[in-house]
Structures are given as structure tokens and as C-alpha cells.
Image (tube, rainbow, N blue to C red):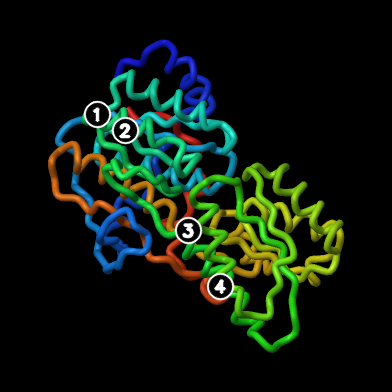
Amino acid sequence: MMLNSKFFSKLLPAVLLAGSTALVGADDWFPYNVEVWNPAFDMNSPRTDFSYQPLEAASEQWDICVSFPHMKDAYWSAVNYGVTAEAGRLGVKMQLVEAGGYTNLNTQISQIEDCVSAGANAVIIGAISFDGLNNLVTEIRKKDIPVIDVINGMSSPELSAKSLVSFGEMGYKAGEYIAQQHPAGSDKVKVAWFPGPPGAGWVEAGNQGFQDAVKDSAIEVVETKYGDTGKEVQLKLVEDTLEAHPDINYVVGTAVTAEAAVGLLRSRELLDQIKIMSYYFTPGVYQGIQRGQILAAPTDSAVIQGRIAIDQAVRILEGQDYEKHVGPKLYVIDDSNVDSFDRDSSLAPDSFKPTFSVN
């Protein structure tokens, strides 16, 4: 794939950082149990169980552009592993760009435009904004280039496919888990809630789901604080909340929030007093559950979402049948199943390094 100089200048530092990464295992990840939404693109549509079977290989070496909001946490490393491994398995090219954070919508748009100008046959987007990329999607689709929405969600009706779960359900499962321990009529407990970056589709959905799950329980949400999923940002939010509400019983939020809270509460000798929960799953959350420092977290099998997005792109390019709106089935991981769940579906291998190019 020939890159124009503007695109290459943005991509080169990432490639140099990545170095050479051997793709590890899990080429036999399928068939995988997923849910299919019909009608597609409406998270309230009925879902049916489906055994997902990807293509054996691509018929040609398509160029696929993948755009992520950032690569600052291990959640996106898992999705990175998914798209990288599946591109390698199918025999297609993949170029990944990342915008550096949820405040950088214009950067994401510019990077995707450069990707398309460089000759991408399909674009996979983990969107910074639910609505903010819709005009871009329209322009890309006018060029007859497929656009797949992965993980975060976009509102454009012109998308070609979605590989994502309901983050409303993710938030709901987290809230439900603690609400079941504190039903209505029991002693009140105070929860600080950190849903993530404001304006992101997955955050708004997760917030609504969590609030719905706890509203008829003994849980009082004393603080809801939004912020980018960088560790320093989340740590500051938790610190500020502890100052304002020293009597909270739970910290619940993003995986980065949970990981930051572990260190902070341990340093203040509060781990026995304040419980921590994440509403999605990362290696740090996995380790925290194993060590008894984090209560639980639902998993959306992020690796599988990345794999399916690549397969959807190839199927569309090759005129093959494809499922338009797919997401892995959700389940909660806690101390009862942390040592027995399918790790490869949710986490990148320990040896995996950020990978920005598959050729």
C-alpha cells in the first residue's frame, strides 16, 4: 500500500514504537457464540444467538484502515490484538491509526481522511464521538468504501456494519451486580460512579444502563464524574471524590478508574473499606479480581469484536454474506470464574506489543 507523505508522517512514529510483533495463537477462535441484532443498528432490536464462523482466508490482499480513539490502556490493546491477528489470519493488510485521546475528534477525522486518500479499501472505526463522525462516514460511503463501527458506537445510518455490544447492558450488568447485594430496604450504600469521557456513545449508554440497574436498590450514587480514560485523569477524579465523599462504599467505573483506584486506596489503607468495580475488562482488572482487590467486571470479549470487524470488512469487499450487527454475549467475571473463563477472547497475550501495521 502506497502511503501519501502526510499519512506516513503520522503513521511512522507508531510503527517504530511497535517494532516487530509475532502474532500469538488463537487462530482457532471460531466458531464463537455471538448475538445478532435485527433490525440492525438499533440497540433495542431483538437479538438472536448466532454461531459466528469467519472466512477461511481473503481472496486478495485488501487494505484495511483501522482507527482507534487512543492506545493508552490495555482495553484497546485487546482490540488491537483482535484486528491484527485476524488481518494476519485472513491475509489482508491493516494500517492502524490512533487519535491520542477522546478530546481529539478532529485528529481522528483527519487520520481517517488520510487513510482513505492513501487507498484504503475499507475503514474500521472505534469512534471518539457518537455523532461527530457522521459526515465523514457519509463521504467515505460515497466512495463505495465499507465503514465498520467497532466497540464504541456511531449514530450514522450509512454504516456498513457494526461489531459491538450494548454498553448500556455493560453498565447495567455492573450496576445489577452490586444492586443484588444491596436490595431495596437494606442499609444504604454510597457509590461514586465514573462512566468515562463525556460525549462518547459507549459512555452515555453505559451511564444510562448503570443508573437504571441501581435505581430501585439501596444504592445512592453520590457522585458521577466524567473524564478521559487516561490514568492521571481518572486518578484525579477519584482523589477529588474521596475528598468530597470520604464515606463512600464503592468506586465503580472504567477499567482505568478501577486500576487507578486500587493503588490510591491501597496507599490510604482503604481497600478493606471501599470496594472497586469496573464495567469492562482489562488485564489490570483481571489481576485485581485475582488478587481480591477488584470485585468484578463484565466482559464484552474485546478481542472477538476486533476479529469480527476485520472479517465483516473482508466479507463486504468480497460480496459475501455477512451479519450486519454482531456482538459477543456478555457475562460477568468475578472470583467465581476468574480462573476458568476464556481469557483469549477478552485479553491480548502477555507478549503482545502495540501493532500498527500488518503487511
Determine which quarter of the picture holds residue 81. Answer: top left
Q: Is residue 72 left or right of residue 167?
A: right
Label 2 secondary element:
helix
Q: Which mark is residue 4?
A: none
Against 35, is 260 above or below? above
Q: CA distance from mark 1 to mark 3?
A: 29 Å
Residue 142: which numbered mark, if any? Answer: 1
Return the disc, 2 or 3, that comes first in the chain's sequence.
2
Mark 1 or mark 3: which is in front? 1
Q: Classify 198 as above or below 168.
A: above
Q: Residue at x 62, y 66 (%)?
A: 290
Q: Please tell me how crowded label 2 is: few (under 14), some (14-19), or many (20+) other residues with Cα within 10 Å.
A: some
| First in residue order: circle 1 vs circle 3 | 1
User: Looking at numbered disc 3 in the image, what kind of residue is underneath it?
Assistant: Phe
The residue tagged with tag 4: helix, strand or loop?
A: helix
Residue at mark 4: 213
Which residue is identified by label 2?
Answer: 138
Which element is circle 1 on? helix
Q: Residue at x 54, y 52 (%)?
A: 203
Measured Cα–Cα span from mark 1 to mark 2: 6 Å
The C terminus - image quarter? top left
What residue sits right under mark 3 in the picture? 167
Q: Amino acid at mark 2?
A: Thr
Image quadrant holding the N terminus, namely: top left
* Tag 1–tag 2 contact (CB < 8 Å): yes
What is the crowding at mark 4: few (fewer than 14 residues within 10 Å), some, or many (at least 20)? many
Dot 3 lies on which element? helix
